[in-house]
Structures are given as C-alpha cells and as structure tokens.
Image (cartoon, rainbow, N blue to C red):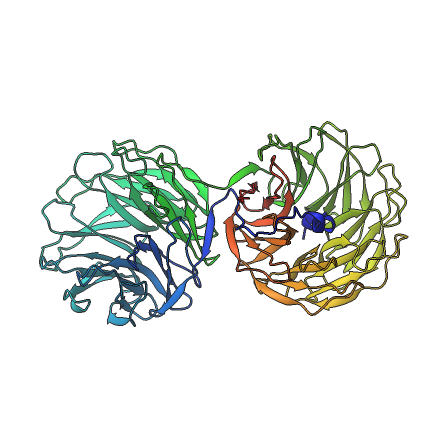
Amino acid sequence: MTNVVAKVACLAALSFGSSLAQNISFNAPRAFPAGSVPSDVAVGDFNKDGKPDLAVPDSSSGKVSIMLGNGDGTFQRPVQYDAGKSPRFIAVKDFRHNGTLDLAVANYNSDDVSILLGNGDGTFQAPVEYSAGNNPDYLAVGDFNGDKKLDLAVINYSSTTISILLGNGDGTFRSAPDQTLGGTQAAAIIAVDLRRNGRLDLAVTYGLNTLAVLMGHGDGTFAKPVTYRTSNAPVSLTAADFNNDGKLDIAVGCSYPHGVVAIFPGNGDGTLQSPKNYPAGAFVRSVAAADLRHNGKQDVVASNASSDNVSVLLGNGDGTFAKAVNYQVASSPQAVAIADVNGDKEYDLVIASNNSNLVTVLLGNGKGHFAGTKNAGGGVGAIGAASGDFNHDGNPDLAIADSASNSVSILLGNGNGTFQKAVRYSVGIAPKGVAVGDFNNDGHLDLAIANSGSNDVSILLGNGDGTFLAVAPCNVDSGPVSLVVQDFNKDNNMDLAVANQGSGTISILLGNGDGTFQTAVPKSVNLGPVSVAVGDLNNDGNWDLAVADSGAGVISILLGKGDGRFQAAVDYPAGANVYSVAIADFNNDKVPDLVAVLNEENQVAILLGNGDGTFKTAKTHAVGISPIGVVAADFNNDGNMDVAVSGFTSTVTILTGNGNGSFQAPTYFVAGSGSYGIIQANLTSSLLPDLVVANQFSDTVSVLTNTTQP
C-alpha cells in the first residue's frame, strides 16, 4: 500500500550475471513452515542421524508436523501425522525403552491423548488414543509409580483435573484415578522432584492466579494440592535450581495484565517461598530454563504472544535475574524449546508461532545472546519506506512514513547497514506512502508523502545535508495511500502518480521543476487502488502504471501517452484483496512482468508480460500469512529476479526465481511486529540488495542485510 514499489521499474536491471544460483540468506533469524496453527514444539532425534528434529502439534488441522533437521539449524519441510482434535501440547520420550523416540500429544477438543510410536527413521505409527478429562491442554512425563516405566500426567483445562495414565513400558498406557484440583481453567503441569526423595511431584497452574504442588506418593497417586498465589493468568511453568542451593525452584509464566516470570524458590521439602516477579514481554505463553552460558547459572526464556518476541532473562545464580532482553520472532509465539540445533554445542531457541504457521530458530552464541533481527527506531505506526542518499555522503538513508504520529522519520545511514537516530518531520494526517525524487532540480533528493487522512501529498524539499524543508502540500482525491515518482511528460521534471483508495482514482501531478506541482488530474480505476508501480510495459518509451486494486481483485494497467496523460485502465484478474504490485522481468525475456500480493489468499500472483502492455493469466505462489508489501530484485546474483514479500505476521517471505517465471519453495526470515512496507536498497559495501521493512506494531524498521554467499 506504500511506495514499496516506487523504484521497481529499474529493478529488472539489477542483475550481476552469475550463472549459479545460491540460497538466499539475510542477517535475520530463519523461520520454517510448521503446519496449521502450531501450538507447541519439542525437539528430538527421530531418525537417529545425530541431528535434532522437531515435532509440532498443529491445533487447527489435528496433525503433528515432523520437521527433520539438517544439523545446521535449518529444517526440512514438515511431514504430517494424524493426532486428535486440536492438539495443544506434545512430549517426546522413549516410552518403550528401545532407543526410539515416541510422541505423546494432548488433544484439547477430543478429550484424549494420542501416542505415536516412532519407527526410528523419522516416521511414526498411527496414533493410539487414551481418554483424558475435559479439554486436555498440557501433559507431563515421568515414572510416577516407581516401576521404571514412563507415565503421563495430563492436565484438563475445563474439568480442572489431572488424568494419570500409567505406562506399561511397551508404549501402551492404562488409566488411573483422576486427581481433582478444584478451581477452574487448569493450564499447565510439570513433573519435578521437589523433595529430592526420588518421588516425582506435580506442579500445576490453574484459575486466575494459582500455582499448586501435589506431592507424589511414589505409587502413581498424589497428595492434595498445596496452593500458592501467582500473578494473574499463570499459563506455563518450568523448574530448575535458580539460586544454586541444590533445591529445585519453579518459574511460572504469567500473561496478564503484564507478562511476568514469577520465580518461586524451593525449600527442598516440597514447599515454596514467596515469588519474585520479573517483567517479560506482552502476554507470556510459555517458559523454559537452561544454562545458556555454561556458567552454572540457570537462565529463563519466555515466549510473548502479543509482542511477537521472546524474552531472555539471564540468571545471576542467586535466584535473581538481569533485565529481559527481547528477540523478535514470527507472530504470536506460543511455545519455546531450548536445544542445540546447529551442532555448535551452544543452546539455541526454537519457537512455535500460531499466527504465522512458522517455527522460528534463534541461534545462540553460548554467551546468552542470540542472532536476532536488526531493528532501527521508526516513528509510531511505521508503514511506508523509501531510500536515498539525502546528505550526499554516499550512504543510503531511509525515509519512513509513520501513520500513527503524522510524521516522516529520517534515518541517516552509516554505510554498514546501521542508522543514526531518527529525526522526524510533521506531515499530513495518517501518512501511508513515501517516495523520493528531485522535485526542484537542485541535485538534492526530496520527499513526497501520501497522507490518507488529510487527502493530500506532503512535499519535503531536501537541503542536501539530510534535513528537509516543508512546502505547501498538494491536494489529491480521497484516501491517498501509495505513490511513485517519474517524468511522465518528458519535460525533465519529476511528476507524481498517487493511488487514492477512497475514491478509486489515480491522481497525476505534473511537476513544475521548482518543487511545486500542477493541480492533480484524476484517472479512474476501480474500487480500491492501494498500490501503484511504474515501468515501460509496452516498450514504447513512455512510462506506464500498474495499479493493485484490493476491492476489485485486479491489476489495472494504464498505458502512458508520454505527455502526462494515460489511456483508460485495462484490468487483469489477480486474486482476492490485492495489496501491492511490483514490476520486474521474471522469465528473462526482456519484457516487464508483474507480481501482486494477494492478502486474503496468502499468495502472490505472477502475470507474465507479452511486451505490448498486455499480460498473461495470473499464476499464484504461496507465501507467508497476511502478506502486505512486495519488492523484486536479484538477491543471489544469479541473473534471475527474486521476490521478497512482507507479512503482517512479522516475517519476510523470499521466493527465489528460476528465471522462467517460476519460483522455488518459499523461505522465511523474521522482521518486526506488524511488518508492512518493504523496499530493497544496497545498505552495505556488498553489491547484493538488502531489505528494509517498516513495522507498524513495533514502531521499528527492520534491516535485513544480505548475507548470501557468492
């Protein structure tokens, strides 16, 4: 919807001539497809190749996704196995004591637990179900009756009970009497020896603010719960010795109203001391503990569903923790697992996110830090982005449209992918798009900003030193959201084309060459134009327009006459809710093609050009959930154009081009929360294009520098 495509007309020329395609990579965490609405994640070596694999329950599809690991922190595409209705939690254990890992899955809507026995080659047998209580949500594994066979304790959300399933040692289970908790909304359970007597106890959370401990008798039964008060909405817990006194403590993740991790020190006799709370992110969903630094001090990691990040709380070894450090992940993280997934003997983080259908991997360095997305500060509600050298230092700078603060943020570049602190300029109401051009022919780059709330375009004239001077805005039709810059009438002055979503028009503003523009001339298109791109689509030497129309689901083509006027729009069906469009040559026939984002269908549409301004029928390719912006460039220097798509689920999808109009399977990288506008720019000394993403929810700009190997 922004001018993320303002410069796409020239992107087809960005090819560096390599004949060998390379895997595209950026300096940002990878994310991997994991089925439909992943709710949990567990790690284990399912095919005995020495490489960690993942098991992910998909709560929407009733499946479990198995993602075999490559040993380098990446994972193969998922293979799915039936589980039950709405699987929520998964445990990985060797229930048969045969050296092969099996799965236990709590199925929320079928009131049972599925056992999937492993075959040792990464595949699993058909599930066998065992009845539980109402809405099983979480389970714990341990030998509760001292027979050296693994048992299950299943917490049931609605009935507020614990179902005990005693293991027979062959992968089958038998029911034992349920344990009643009282209260409501049982959420989480772990098995832990709080008394150091070899008998496993249970720690559970339920109700508004209750943690309960049930002492194990060692025969598969448990004492009545002893309760402790937590912060509100305790949804997850883990145990470790956080103060190095030889006694296990409990960490509880509490989600409301502010996400905290509550630390309950253990006394070694099954009782707990009063907790101390440590702030995490918004709406904590899970917690895990490990010694991330190998220094004998236990650390805690919390996944935060509403802030789209994980919080790492490094332990001081005395039961206290340093201030949380947050790392962006794919949208709505539900669960976090800690394991070494790339074979470097350091702990990494694996996070399942249900809004994006992805699992994010954060690689650790052994010092408690993880490889995260690099973000710069934008304004409130960062949506649109553009790049140019505003101060003539040879380094690309950024201009970000901040829709919620009615401003544009200017971030001067340092030439290495980092930026100076943003300087903000007031513009109109609810700016959405920003474009760069020299409007007064003084050799300095200027800015044009589409203000959707005030129905005008702000003009900021550049002073050449990175500062700008505002001049009178230009009135356009209702709801301007995207704009591009080009000389449409061949008078050597830059002009504007503005997509007006509210009025269904494109406004053409011819430049006077002094920073002012003639009165806008509207050109009718369809119901809701949201993005505009410029290029010579019919090879006649005149600039043409491609307009994404979300209301009509089409790409409208307006062929230019070379005098600032355009022919009537011709529509090409694309798909539901077209959000943005870019122009590039995807099949190497030297003819411009189109790529359009289909927001509702989670796809992009490719329309190959015929060279005369007409286009073939659209072909679609899957991308991430809720795609928004699109840009095309040759990211791996193989001579073929690739596609990058921003997604509202905090990710960027990369489609590697094959050079014939088709693309390889998508790969995913983490950006910021509410990823919106996306542009490409050469931000470092590398010749490969980098990516910049404006993040509406986190008020940041993600900088993904290209790390593709030659």
Query: Would residue 386 be seen by someone viewing this image from the given angle?
Result: yes
Q: Nearer the viewer, residue 584 or 524?
A: 584
Q: Residue furthest front?
A: 19
Q: Is residue 493 left or right of residue 348?
A: right
Pinpoint residue 372: horizontal percent, then vertical percent: 46, 41
Pinpoint residue 602: horizontal percent, then vertical percent: 56, 62
In this rendering, is residue 377 above or below 204?
A: above
For the point 59% across and 54% down, the residue is 645
Total marks in image: 0
Q: Quadrant of residue 608?
A: bottom right
Q: Nearer the viewer, residue 18 or 518?
A: 18
Pinpoint residue 381: horizontal percent, then vertical percent: 60, 44
In this rendering, is residue 633 above or below 246?
A: below
Q: Is residue 39 left or right of residue 406?
A: left
Pinpoint residue 613: horizontal percent, then vertical percent: 79, 63
* Quadrant occupied by the C terminus: top right
Q: Is residue 158 left or right of residue 421?
A: left
Q: Nearer the viewer, residue 309 or 665?
A: 665
Q: Quadrant of residue 369?
A: top left
Q: Nearer the viewer, residue 423 or 390?
A: 390
Query: Would residue 403 be seen by someone viewing this image from the given angle?
Result: no
For the point 15% across and 52% down, the residue is 200
